[in-house]
């Protein structure tokens, strides 16, 4: 247990499970650590607005990530690269306001922590103070160690993100990471470094399932997989992908649990038809 906060916070007395538990207070990084000790798997979804976040909170999703995937999935950019700290702060605050129980993790956008620990602390502090997030996430293992150590020392829980790191799309592309002995060893080193620096969890994105399993066995902090096979302690998906709202191509690792794009389009067409045909508004919608 490297996080000091974890030692001072009491464990939840009622209903412990992260998903399906009865607790109503805000989930903490201590609860996340306890889940790994119990061998419990847990779900994480992205969220970018208060209403969607409240739906997931009421559904019992214990951890939500205000991902910089808001670039593609909410703000209309082609990648995560243009997302700003202002945009992240505004949408993170909305997600915090829309939730009561979930731990909210804010993603540090590209260019808001790469300069070094001082910049990282400034950016993360803004998300904690202004938006009220309970933790932050940043991409990179060894390359982001000074940042991770500084945030943890300052009392900000850090989730690390390894494997495919989309902020490096211009050098990395969107390819599977950690294939081959050398790349696999580098990923293991990165994961251990993140853990040693005090990270409370580590995202593994688009890495071979066998490697993700090995990392999961090697760490005492939980791994959160996306395109990393079934062995990780948790799974995260971009909510618009899993709900079928994302238009165009979605990564092969997602599963679509609803067809919101169809449902919403049908609703819009039904409304339009009623307006054009005079069926809406009806008498009960009018004031006299
Ligand atoms: N809508 C959406 N979903 C995501 O999961 C997501 C984003 N956006 N934006 C930020 C990052 C970028 N991510 C991506 C983007 C592309 C692939 C992709 O093209 N994957 C290929 C496999 C590549 C390979 O075989 O090496 C695929 O077919 O899934 C994967 C993850 C994941 N994140
Ligand atoms: C896919 C997850 C891990 C992420 O970083 C994001 O949504 O921005
Ligand atoms: Mg991200």
Image (cartoon, grey):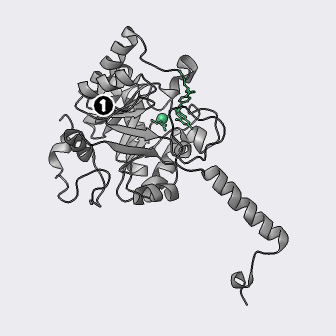
Tally of marks: 1
Nearer the observer, 180 or 46:
180
Residue 58 is left or right of residue 201, and the answer is right
14 is higher (above) or lower (below) than 252? below
Which residue occupies 25% across, 27% down? 217
Q: Residue 143: percent from the left, percent from the top?
A: 38, 20
Towards the viewer: 256 or 206: 256
Spot the residue most to the bottom: 288
Residue picked out by circle 1:
150
- Which x, y percent locates residue 250? 59, 35
Residue 139 in sight from this viewpoint: yes
* Left or right: residue 4 compared with residue 97: left
Locate residue 225: give its quadrant. Answer: top left
Q: Name the quarter where the C terminus is drawn.
A: bottom right
Callout 1: SS: helix
Q: Where is residue 71 in the image (x, y as percent from the top left)?
A: 58, 39
In this view, the residue in front, 143 or 111, is: 143
Inspect this view and state whether residue 141 appears. Answer: no
Badge 1 crowding class, 10 Å Cα cut-off, few under 14, some 14 to 19, many 20 or more, is some
What is the x, y in percent for residue 113?
A: 43, 30
Residue at the image position 35 percent from the left and 28 percent from the top: 147
């Amino acid at each position: 247990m490297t996080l000091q906060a974890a030692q001072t916070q009491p464990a939840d007395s009622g209903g412990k499970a992260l998903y399906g538990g009865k607790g109503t207070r805000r989930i903490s990084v201590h609860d996340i650590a306890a889940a790994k000790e119990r061998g419990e798997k847990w779900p994480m979804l992205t969220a970018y607005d208060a209403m969607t976040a409240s739906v997931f909170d009421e559904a019992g999703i214990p951890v939500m990530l205000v991902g910089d995937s808001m670039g593609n999935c909410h703000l209309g950019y082609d990648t995560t690269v243009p997302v700003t700290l202002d945009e992240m702060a505004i949408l993170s605050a909305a997600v915090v306001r829309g939730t009561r129980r979930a731990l909210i993790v804010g993603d540090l956008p590209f260019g808001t922590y790469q300069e070094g620990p001082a910049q990282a602390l400034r950016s993360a502090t803004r998300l904690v103070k202004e938006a009220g997030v309970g933790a932050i996430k940043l991409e990179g293992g060894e390359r982001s160690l000074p940042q991770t150590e500084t945030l943890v020392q300052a009392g900000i829980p850090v989730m690390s993100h390894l494997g495919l790191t989309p902020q490096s799309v211009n050098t990395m592309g969107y390819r599977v990471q950690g294939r081959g002995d050398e790349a696999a060893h580098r990923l293991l080193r990165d994961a251990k470094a993140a853990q040693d620096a005090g990270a409370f969890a580590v995202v593994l994105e688009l890495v071979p399932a066998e490697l993700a399993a090995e990392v999961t066995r090697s760490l005492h902090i939980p791994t959160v997989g996306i395109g990393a096979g079934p062995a990780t302690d948790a799974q995260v998906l971009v909510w618009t992908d899993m709900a079928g709202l994302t238009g165009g191509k979605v990564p092969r690792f997602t599963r679509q649990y609803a067809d919101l794009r169809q449902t919403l389009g049908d609703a819009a067409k039904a409304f339009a038809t009623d307006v054009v045909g005079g069926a809406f508004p009806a008498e009960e919608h009018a004031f006299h």
